Image (cartoon, rainbow, N blue to C red):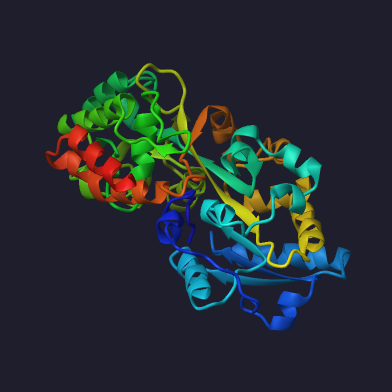
């Protein structure tokens, strides 16, 4: 089952506030593995049914070319991987040598990670899209390597558009609401999918707040209760109050609206890169197209997220072996094959060039330069995003947007 990127969402909440320490025993391996500079333990999440096989093949090819280095892979589901890492640390265990999760900031600020310059060739670091490299950095120092990207873009049902007499996709919130009303008036379908349930309300909310020029941070401060963010939340409430969304959007999750769109029951949603492959698998006859996410003014903006690879320095003896493996992985052919198999967006220039004909890259590559990010390099973001998930849905049930943002700001503080 595909797990679309959440990008610095759940793991920060799990890790914020913990005092993390490193001990001398191995992660899922023996003490000898932990002390051997040429044996690497690698913990990765399952993105899809094919993720383990993809990593197994990459590791096997790498080890054939580098027989002096051994990589031991462990896999966990996204539901459990953060708990596994946390439990190991709390029980005086240790981290893996290489870890693939979303948030890295707590580990970095606790001094546990190698700087990216220690574990990847300069050419690899230079190949990463600047916005994603910045999002993997704290105070100008890069601590993680973005794995791949997910942004959002508007998916719209062209058949429903034609029936409703809509000639072009909306560019502004006003146009979006008007078009959603027209589709809703057809009967039996919803105009726009607004998932404000607890699964990932911060994702949908960010698309709207970013579309008003808002951000979630200013320097080292998490900024929730701002005029721009309030504009975005009020616009969400307005389209819900207009009756142009699915029923009860405050309790509806993202997966629900994606499935409804695939079934032809919703006119427009904010979709992710894997949405393309999901449509191809579940309803290949669906007539749809994509367009930039509508914003307040029509100027392009979207949500960007990335999961990361990070390396724990422990006693500092494994940097050379880690650099060999990660530099191999980020080579254009290897990296592009992995990204294509998982149906996400490449975050390297060479990977994007190798995937110019890939349908995901075609639909989403243009969104990267205008993507804005969660402040995943701020440990306080975890409390804020948790509060957004709990509170934001209430605006569709009568709560005042300003009061909701104030509650979230208090949680972040």
State which quadrant residue 332 falls in: top right
**Does residue 229 appear left or right of residue 40 in this picture?**
left
**Does residue 306 appear left or right of residue 140 in this picture?**
left
Q: Is residue 215 above or below residue 142?
A: above
For the residue pair 176 and 69, the one nearer the viewer reads as 69
Residue extending farthest to the left is: 398
For the residue pair 227 and 286, the one nearer the viewer reads as 227
Q: Point out residue 354 in the picture as x, y percentages from the top left corner.
A: 73, 40
Q: Point out residue 199 in the picture as x, y percentages from the top left corner.
A: 33, 53
Q: Is residue 30 above or below residue 295?
A: below
| Number of marks present in the image shown | 0
Q: Point out residue 290 in the picture as x, y percentages from the top left corner.
A: 46, 31
Residue at image point 42% right, 28% down: 293
Residue at image point 75% right, 76% down: 35
Q: Point out residue 408 in the picture as x, y percentages from the top left corner.
A: 27, 43
Q: Is residue 105 visible?
A: yes
**Does residue 347 appear left or right of residue 364 in this picture?**
right
For the residue pair 388 and 235, the one nearer the viewer reads as 388
**In which quadrant is the C terminus drawn?**
top left
State which quadrant residue 196 falls in: top left
Residue at image point 80% right, 63% down: 321
For the residue pair 69 and 169, the one nearer the viewer reads as 69
Q: Is residue 257 visible?
A: no
Q: Is residue 129 above or below residue 284?
A: above
């Amino acid at each position: 089952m595909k797990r679309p990127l959440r990008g610095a969402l759940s793991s920060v909440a799990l890790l914020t506030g913990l005092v993390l320490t490193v001990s001398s025993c191995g992660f899922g391996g023996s003490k000898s593995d932990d002390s051997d500079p040429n044996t690497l333990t690698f913990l990765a999440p399952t993105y899809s049914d094919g993720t383990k096989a993809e990593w197994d093949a990459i590791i096997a090819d790498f080890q054939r070319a580098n027989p002096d280095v051994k990589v031991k892979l462990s896999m966990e589901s996204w539901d459990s991987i953060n708990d596994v890492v946390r439990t190991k640390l709390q029980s005086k265990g240790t981290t893996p040598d290489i870890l693939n999760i979303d948030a890295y900031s707590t580990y970095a600020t606790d001094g546990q990670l190698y700087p990216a310059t220690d574990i990847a060739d300069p050419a690899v670091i230079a190949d990463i899209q600047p916005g994603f490299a910045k999002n993997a950095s704290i105070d100008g120092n890069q601590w993680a390597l973005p794995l791949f990207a997910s942004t959002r873009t508007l998916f719209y049902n062209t058949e429903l558009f034609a029936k409703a007499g809509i000639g072009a996709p909306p560019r502004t919130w006003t146009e979006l609401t008007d078009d959603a009303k027209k589709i809703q008036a057809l009967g039996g379908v919803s105009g726009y999918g607004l998932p404000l349930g607890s699964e990932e309300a911060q994702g949908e909310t960010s698309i709207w707040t970013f579309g008003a020029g808002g951000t979630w941070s200013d320097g080292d401060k998490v900024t929730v209760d701002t005029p721009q963010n309030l504009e975005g939340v009020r616009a969400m409430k307005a389209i819900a109050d207009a009756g142009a969304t699915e029923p009860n959007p405050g309790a509806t999750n993202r997966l629900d609206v994606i499935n409804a769109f695939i079934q032809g029951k919703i006119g427009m949603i904010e979709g992710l890169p894997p949405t393309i492959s999901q449509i191809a698998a579940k309803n290949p006859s669906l007539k749809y197209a994509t367009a930039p996410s509508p914003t307040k003014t029509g100027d392009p903006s979207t949500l960007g997220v990335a999961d990361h690879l990070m390396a724990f320095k422990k006693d500092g003896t494994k940097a050379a072996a880690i650099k060999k493996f990660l530099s191999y992985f980020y080579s254009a052919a290897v990296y592009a094959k992995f990204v294509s198999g998982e149906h996400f967006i490449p975050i390297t220039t060479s990977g994007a060039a190798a995937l110019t004909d890939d349908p995901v890259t075609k639909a989403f590559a243009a969104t990267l330069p205008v993507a804005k990010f969660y402040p995943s390099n701020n440990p306080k973001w975890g409390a804020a995003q948790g509060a957004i998930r709990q509170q934001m849905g209430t605006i569709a049930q009568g709560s005042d947007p300003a009061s909701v943002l104030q509650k979230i700001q208090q949680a972040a503080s």
